[in-house]
Image: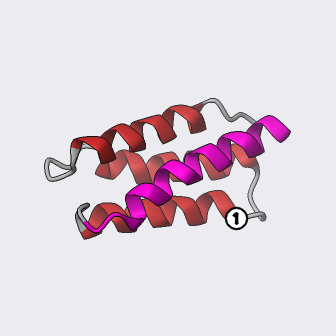
Amino acid sequence: MSEEIEQFKQATVLLQRVAEDTGVPRNIRRAASEAIKMLQRRDLSPGLRAANAISVLDEVSQDPNMPLFARTAIWQAISLLEQVRD
């Protein structure tokens, strides 16, 4: 359980950097914020929270307007969240 919490924390830090950067398009910042909210929900199991966040991030990860550093951060967050299982 603590491993999942650590992965959620690391993913949240990565996503917050993207969400707070004004050089990133608004739709991508919004998706990062939405993914953070998904990770913080306590009423869902860790695996479901991770899957929901991955789904949101996967949609915007192919956006051609995304800066390279933001794409890398999102891919890193997805990679961390893919390791979470119920």
Residue, x 51% and y 59% (percent of image)? 35
* Local secondary structure at mark 1: loop
**Would you say residue 18 sits in the magenta stretch?**
yes
Say few, some or many: other residues with alpha carbon within 10 Å of mark 1 (under 14 / 14 to 19 / 20 or more).
Answer: few
Which residue sits furthest right? 1
Residue 14 relative to residue 8: left or right = left
Quadrant that contains the N terminus: top right
Image: 31 above or below 57: below
Please state the horizontal and vertical placement of residue 46, each as a whole percent of the image: 73, 47
Q: How is the image coloured?
A: secondary structure
Residue, x 49% and y 45% (percent of image)? 54
Q: Amino acid at mark 1?
A: Arg
Please state the horizontal and vertical placement of residue 45, each as a whole percent of the image: 76, 51
Please state the horizontal and vertical placement of residue 11, each as a whole percent of the image: 57, 46
Q: Which residue is mark 1?
A: 41
Q: In the rendered structure, which segment of residues is drawn in magenta?
A: 1-22
